[in-house]
Image (cartoon, rainbow, N blue to C red):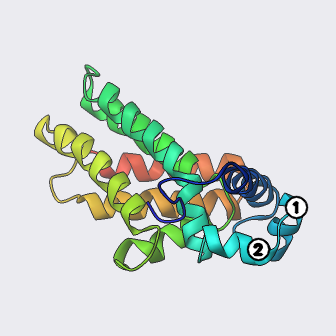
Amino acid sequence: MPGEPRRMRADARRNYERLLAEANTAFLAQGTEVSLEQIAKNAGVAIGTLYSHFPTRQALLEALMRERIKTITARTRELREHPSPGEALDTWVRAAVAHAGSYRGLATSLMSAFEDESSALHAACRELTTAGELLLDRAQQAGVVRPDATASDLFALVNAMAWAGESVPADQAERLLAFSLDGLRTR
């Protein structure tokens, strides 16, 4: 995986973990465009140390997203057994929106990385899309979701709803998500 060498010395491992912890704190508080220099400073390392572990901002985001994506993927496996394919898809979309909205600016980064195979976030985007596609296909086969909806539509919807969550009051963001989910359903 980008950003994490196979074997690190103990001090390099500590620096790596401190950088991730500080990046998480900074991204939660200030969004994904926070200064990388500030993250390095807060972690007690030089900016060169940050760049040696994470050559780009997206590589840093990708490292932070790894565990969250594992959680969503595990949740997808559980939801594949849910008795209602439509409810399973709704639950997954809500979880994916929460993931994409975890840091202000992340949804925008994910959308740009979706098509950019050179992006450190591209693999994470594809993994999320594949997970959602499993539930989308199941809901379509059950006849509860429009047959013309695609996995990339679902990915865009998730990111649009995460972006809306950054931009409008929470109650409005919830209504917009409900409208969007309703629009996926067959009539």
**Residue at image mark 1:** 44
* CA gap, disc 1 and disc 2: 12 Å
Q: Quadrant of the N terminus?
A: bottom left
Q: Nearer the viewer, residue 171 or 161?
A: 161
Instruction: Give coordinates of residue 156: x percent, y percent.
Output: 40, 65
Amino acid carrying mark 1 in the image: Gly
Q: Going by the picture, which residue comes out furthest to the top?
A: 83
Evaluate whether residue 27 shows in this view: yes
Residue 142 found in image quarter: top left
Instruction: Give coordinates of residue 98: x percent, y percent.
Output: 57, 46
Q: Nearer the viewer, residue 45 or 118?
A: 45
Query: Nearer the observer, disc 1 or disc 2?
Result: 1
User: Do the residues under discs 1 and 2 have CB atoms within 8 angstroms?
Assistant: no
| Residue at left offset 44%, top offset 76% | 119
**Structural crowding at the residue carrying mark 1, measured as other residues with C-alpha within 10 Å and reported as few (<14), some (14–19) or many (≥20):** some
Q: Is residue 122 above or below residue 116?
A: above
Instruction: Give coordinates of residue 26: x percent, y percent.
Output: 80, 59
Residue 107 found in image quarter: bottom right
| Residue at left offset 52%, top offset 44% | 68
* Secondary structure state at the residue bearing disc 1: loop
Judged left or right of residue 155, residue 134 is left
